[in-house]
């Protein structure tokens, strides 16, 4: 029986990757030690084969550096229509409550990246620009996100909070910029790559995040994160990442979002 990757072995993997070690040689060493091949390939960023996909489907759990959260790849990894991960308990209830307080203390109407007029009912939530706060707590949350996903903080936009009251929503949209939007919002940083979104509370009813082209729906749960890549493997825009925030039917919803850029 193959062993699950340990935190110690993950640290060893990341340390060797930083040294530009050959991933296939690292994989061979790990397999000789009896570690699960699908977990090893995912940790090393190697493509999974058909046999590996069966193993991932049966046991889709891999431990990540520093944060022992469950990561569940969505859909076939080899011919993936979109790269999406669900991470349970990424933040504690205490951190979520503190973030909700920070967000709701200074809100502004949410906007969209539009080059012209748009329907004011398209996005009806409120936003808080957390990244502009002089707060070590918020900075630590920002660093935790960047460390977890393994992208340097210099590639990230500022951390934002969004708050939805009953009846508020964000209709179908993409996080990447279309041609006209990119001209306006590029500012030398390039296209958006990954989105890292965290639910800060469990909604009584409604407020789901739906990816209609993938037939996938995620319900808000306190501390749970959704991470997805807005681009395909060849860096083209992935329209399958079109998503929407369904109206909150009972209660309210608060999330934080961080977007990453190419440059």
Image: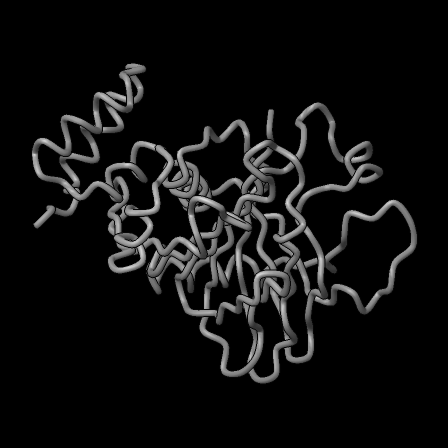
Q: Nearer the viewer, residue 8 or 100?
A: 8
Give the percent coordinates (x, y) of residue 253.
55, 70
Q: Nearer the viewer, residue 172 or 137?
A: 172
Residue reaching furthest right?
117
**From what the image shows, is residue 67 above or below residue 89?**
above
Q: How many marks?
A: 0
Q: Residue at x 68, y 52 (%)?
A: 174
Q: Residue at x 13, y 36 (%)?
A: 8
Give the percent coordinates (x, y) of residue 92.
33, 60
Colouring style:
one colour
Q: Nearer the viewer, residue 214 or 142?
A: 214
Horizontal side of 47 relative to 235 (left or right) equals left
Give the percent coordinates (x, y) of residue 200.
46, 64
Horizontal side of 194 relative to 191 (left or right) equals left
Horizontal side of 237 relative to 119 (left or right) equals left
Q: Residue at x 20, y 32 (%)?
A: 11
Residue reaching furthest front?
50
Give the percent coordinates (x, y) of residue 32.
9, 31
Q: Nearer the viewer, residue 54 or 156?
A: 54
Horizontal side of 227 relative to 188 (left or right) equals left
**From what the image shows, is residue 223 above or below residue 157?**
below
Looking at the rendered image, the quarter that the C terminus falls into is top right
Q: Residue at x 67, y 33 (%)?
A: 191
């Amino acid at each position: 029986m193959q062993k699950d990757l340990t935190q110690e072995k993950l640290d060893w993997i990341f340390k060797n990757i930083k040294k530009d070690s050959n991933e296939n040689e690292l994989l061979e060493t790990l397999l000789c030690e009896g570690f699960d091949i699908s977990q090893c390939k995912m940790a090393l960023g190697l493509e999974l084969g058909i046999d590996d996909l069966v193993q991932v489907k049966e046991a889709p759990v891999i431990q990540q550096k520093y944060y022992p959260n469950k990561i569940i790849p969505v859909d076939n990894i080899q011919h993936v229509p979109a790269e999406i991960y669900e991470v349970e308990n990424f933040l504690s209830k205490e951190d979520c409550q503190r973030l909700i307080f920070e967000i709701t203390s200074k809100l502004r109407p949410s906007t969209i990246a539009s080059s012209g007029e748009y329907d004011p009912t398209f996005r009806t939530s409120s936003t808080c620009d957390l990244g502009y706060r002089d707060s070590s707590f918020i900075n630590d949350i920002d660093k935790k996100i960047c460390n977890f996903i393994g992208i340097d903080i210099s590639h990230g936009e500022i951390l934002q909070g969004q708050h939805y009251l009953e009846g508020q929503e964000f209709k179908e949209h993409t996080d990447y910029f279309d041609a006209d939007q990119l001209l306006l919002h590029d500012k030398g940083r390039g296209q958006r790559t990954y989105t890292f979104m965290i639910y800060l509370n469990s909604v009584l009813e409604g407020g789901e995040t739906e990816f209609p082209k993938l037939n996938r729906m995620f319900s808000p749960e306190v501390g749970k994160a959704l991470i997805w890549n807005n681009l395909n493997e060849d860096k083209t825009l992935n329209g399958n990442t079109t998503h929407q925030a369904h109206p909150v039917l009972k209660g309210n919803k608060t999330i934080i979002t961080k977007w990453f850029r190419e440059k």
